[in-house]
Image (cartoon, rainbow, N blue to C red):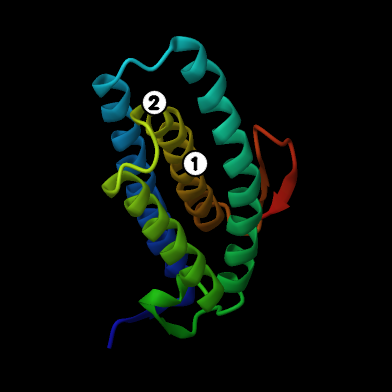
Amino acid sequence: MFKVQGKYLLTIASTVWILAGLNIFRLGVLACLEGSTPVWVMATGIPLVFLAFHMMFSKLVGKHSDRIRGYGDEKIHVLRFFDVKGYVIMTVMMGGGISLRAFGLVPVWFIAFFYTGLGIALTLAGIGFLLHFVKRGGNIVCPVTKKTRLA
């Protein structure tokens, strides 16, 4: 029950990451519209947050894609697109983000640039999983880091 061929875990991972990324991006944009975040903060903050997280997520996408491809055609539970460490990191990040907003621990201008940059990086990571699914056996070149990875 709830098992799919291993290769389809890449599409599940892609969907989860894209949906999470778009939601975080949406929250960032809403925070932009809510407050009076200075343009210079947005113009510098969004690219810096994006680059920091993109560099981390691109490694993660490659690592998880390699692990998922290792399953081959074996039927695997749908939640195995992450390993235990991945679920722990996701839980801490989500819990931290929700807490920061819910308890007002950071100003709206911080949410505006941080969530916007993070949302873009998450969405691009989701697209990375999709590319690993589509281009099995081919090369994938990251447009930001210019690193080549076998799909």
Q: Residue at x 53, y 75 (%)?
A: 83
Instruction: Where is residue 28? Give x, y as percent.
Output: 35, 32
Location of mark 2 (residue): 109
Instruction: Where is residue 9? Give x, y as percent.
Output: 44, 69
> Tag 2: residue type?
Trp
Res 13 label: none
Instruction: Where is residue 81? Give x, y as percent.
Output: 46, 70
- Residue 151, can we see it? no
Instruction: Look at the picture and state if 35 lies above or below 108.
Output: above
Q: Earlier in the sequence, mark 1 or mark 2?
A: 2
Q: Secondary structure at mark 2?
A: helix
> Tag 1: residue type?
Leu
Residue toward you, 87 or 16: 87
Instruction: Look at the picture and state if 71 lies above or below 150.
Output: below
Q: Residue at x 56, y 55 (%)?
A: 132
Location of mark 1 (residue): 124
- How many marks do you count on the picture? 2
Quadrant of residue 2 within the rendered picture: bottom left
